[in-house]
Amino acid sequence: MACLLEAPLRISVLSEVTATSRHYVDRLFDPDPQKVLQGVIDMKNAVIGNNKQKANLIVLGAVPRLLYLLQQSSSSMELRTECAVVLGSLAMGTENNIKSLVDCHIIPALLQGLLSPDLVFIEACLRCLRTVFISPVTPVQLLYTDPTVIPHLMSLLSNSLRTQEYITQIFSHCCKTPEHQTILFNHGAIQNIAPLLISPSYKVRMQALKCFSVLAYENTQVSMTLVNVLVDGELLTQVFVKMMQRDQPIEMQLTAAKCLTYMCRASAIRTDDSCIVLKTLPCLVRMCSKEHLLEERVEGAETLAYLMEPDVELQRIASTTDHLVAMLADYFKYPSSVSAITDIKRLDHDLKHAHELRQAAFKLYASLGSNDEEIRKKPILESGVMELLCSLTQSDSPALRVNGIWALMNMAFQADQKVKVEIVRCLGTEQLFRLLSDPDTNVLMKTLGLLRNLLSQRAHIDQVMSSHGKQIMQAVTLILEAEHSIEVKEQTLCILVNIADGNTAKDLIMTNDDMLQKIKYYMGHSNVKLQLAATFCVSNLIWNEEDGSQERQDKLREMGFVDILHKLTQSSEPNLSDRAKTALQQYLA
């Protein structure tokens, strides 16, 4: 017992320790086992729903004594079970309570308890373990410390509905890394948990479903295995499809959609499979609508963004499904007018989720607009979202500025001239250049990305540079001269590469000796990425088939560029030497 008492107790509860609390703890030390049992039962009744009482008992050292009684073989089964129940109740208090319990080594004691033959005791231990493990302050690694624990938990799954519910809930909360996924997979998680998807208990079905969603996430091995699993003669994917039906609880629809989404992203299900196009995608779009709770909308939007991110066809279908773009515009209107919400708790909840809602909408816009021109143009331009995104780039919050500019950057990617002109008009050149000197590196990187996307395709490059060339060259100069990271400088040089690819735009570089000297400097830089970008720029400036190439080649030769190119052909970096050789060939052609 002494070793348990030595465990450090984090006493963060400055509460008056009442005489009654001390009385409860004193009774745990009574020499009469019957009185001890009654003391534990009375303690159980006293702590239900009473966080102050729980904290007092923890401060007074009830936990080490309860754990001692729980582990003593001389304790009756009833006493050991009641101790597990009280510990479970203490765990349902505050995060500080959980920390104290974990510090007293409650987890190994309860795991040891699972070796008992008594089912009621096992269930009480599992219930307490479940409560401890679902807390964010518990290190999940504690489940994996002893390699015999996971196989033993798998063997207990068939014991009762309760063991099934608690164990699957523990698994779904403690599966956080690819290594955890592998351990669970190797110990037969799939074949052991699959039958639970048709359990008579909703709680068991739900926890089993959550297990599959965390097991399949970004895991090809698990996803490829799941595709071939049969549950009572039916393919697992079909079981998931049934769970997405409208008559199922929202939580179940969403989690089943996540399972299929993760399997699809892991290439276990094709993106054109009917279970994705006709079932999963519409289910997730449905989750984005107004009648759902804020949390459900956030989860639906984030999962939908993840599902369609790499696939143009899914983006196209989603953009025309159920007014999705208009629904997303609503995400930015939260919370609705504050005066209308009289419930302060509700307002606090809404404000908390409003930010998550906006973030989710950004992810979706970014996915919708990333690969396809048609999708980007019509619904998004018509929904007034562009103005919204531009206004967010002026926010005081760096996170909102980043998201606004990121979404605009995606919209500008391979867009037609009309969309690009609209972005520049809506954002305003002043704001664009203000963002290019933003103190937040993420904002600066995304703004450079936006500029790079605006300056793609020759006609677009020439048009943008003819109206804003002077300011753009100025901004580029300032960034290249300032103290910035390699990534920022590389992105800036890539903008010069694009400008050098224009027909008339390249003159803005060629007539600017200061800029040419900067390009020359970066060709000799110690960082290969910067050398490569600068060499690419030279290559575009002297390209043979274009008007005026001879004069440009002569000028750069005079400035010593050819000598540097010769040096770079000897580089040990194949990409760099190849790029330098390509540039030199322009002189020989």
Image (cartoon, rainbow, N blue to C red):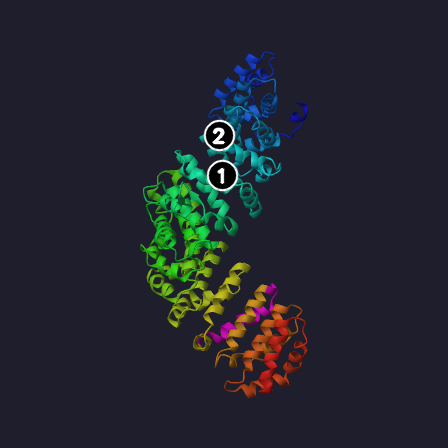
Residue lying at the far front of the rendered structure: 233
**What amino acid type should be assigned to the residue bearing mark 2?**
Asn
The residue depicted at 64 percent of the width and 75 percent of the height is: 577
Mark 2 vs 1, N-terminal side: 2
The percent position of residue 137, horizontal first and vertical second, equals 55, 38
Residue lying at the far top of the rendered structure: 32
Quarter-of-image position of residue 414 = bottom left
Distance between the Cα atoms at labels 2 and 1?
Answer: 12 Å
Q: Pick whichever, 253 or 323, lies toward us.
A: 253
Q: Quadrant of the C terminus?
A: bottom right
Q: Give the side of residue 236 with respect to residue 179, left or right.
A: left
**What amino acid type should be assigned to the residue bearing mark 1?**
Asn
Which disc number belongs to residue 516? Answer: none
Above-or-below relation of 142 to 113: below
Main SS, magenta residues: helix
Q: Give the side of residue 122 with respect to residue 146, left or right.
A: left
**476 within the magenta span:** yes
Q: Pick whichever, 104 or 178, lies toward us.
A: 178
The percent position of residue 521, horizontal first and vertical second, equals 64, 74
The residue depicted at 55 percent of the width and 12 percent of the height is: 34
Above-or-below relation of 138 to 177: above
Magenta stretch in the rendered image: 467-486
Q: Residues within 10 Å of mark 1 (few under 14, many from 20)?
A: some
The residue depicted at 34 percent of the width and 43 percent of the height is: 339
Question: Mark 1 = which residue?
Answer: 192
Q: Residues within 10 Å of mark 2 (few under 14, many from 20)?
A: few
The percent position of residue 547, horizontal first and vertical second, equals 50, 86
The residue depicted at 48 percent of the width and 50 percent of the height is: 223
Q: Pick whichever, 203 or 10, lies toward us.
A: 203
Question: Mark 2 = which residue?
Answer: 159
